[in-house]
Image (cartoon, rainbow, N blue to C red):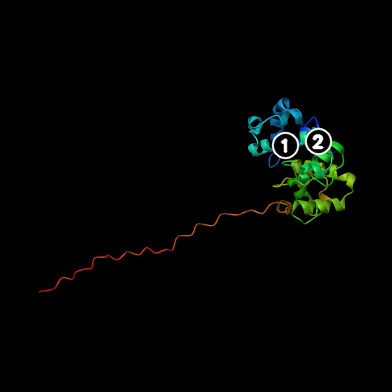
Amino acid sequence: MHPDAHCELDHGSAFQLLVATVLSAQTTDVAVNKVTPGLFARYPDAASLAAAEPIDVQPLIDRIGMFRQKAKNVVGLARILVAKHGGEVPQTLAELVELPGVGRKTANVVLGVMWKKPEGVVVDTHVQRLSQRLGWTKKTDPEDIEQALCALFPREDWDPLSHTLIFHGRRVCFARKPECDNCAVKEACPSAGDKAEKIGRKPSRGPRPAAKKSSTKVTKKKSATPKVRSRRP
């Protein structure tokens, strides 16, 4: 269904992909692709971004969530790349995760897309949801899901696997109302049909409980002045 599955973050180098992936945390690729052209026009490489201050970067990315922290992260990682790696993006997971804002997922995106040598499967919300619906794992923690997928698939499939699942999650197997009728693997999917929507989604928090009324009784203070009883004649 998705022979052209690929990373949908626009980039022209490993450095730009690294920055774009850091910016994509809790933000859509579409939103990131709207801000990176201006960002990379001004700061195309690690050296130029390392010379900037986070406050200079903020206006260029303020249309995405957590832009202040992300501006701090990308400037910080650029400075480390210049200071420790000659301005180049390192090619090992251990070195990448030492950079600000870079975790296993971001590191494996860069390693897989740029050099075809990820050290694990990228597990985002789509990969998590689809791997559960397809019956590949019942785990809910991303690192546990990653281990399960790495055990199921050979290393050479780790990078295309994540892109294919992400493509399918964005186009067919939605979190809500997945289009099972248009899915080419519905016959092999144990979740296909009415129950699919209930699998792989975060549980609903439900309505907030009503605030309890205070049961504290207000007691009247006794007057310090004693009452004088009138005497009947």
Q: Earlier in the sequence, mark 1 or mark 2?
A: 1
**Residue depicted at x 81% and y 45%:** 94
Which corner quadrant holds the N terminus? Answer: top right
The label nearer to you, 1 versus 2, is 2
Where, by quadrant of the figure, is residue 173 drawn?
top right
Type of amino acid at the residue the image marks with label 1: Asp
In whole angstroms, how far apart are the C-alphas of marks 1 and 2?
Answer: 27 Å
**Residue depicted at x 72% and y 37%:** 29
The numbered mark at residue 51 is none
Type of amino acid at the residue the image marks with label 2: His
Residue 191: x %, y % from top left:
77, 53
Residue 111: x %, y % from top left:
83, 40
Left or right of 205: which side holds 100? Answer: right
Residue, disc 1: 29
Residue, disc 2: 85
Residue 225: x %, y % from top left:
24, 65
In this view of the protein, can residue 170 be seen by the observer? yes
Q: Secondary structure at mark 2?
A: helix
Where, by quadrant of the figure, is residue 144 drawn?
bottom right
Residue 51: x %, y % from top left:
71, 29
Left or right of 72: which side holds 183? Answer: right
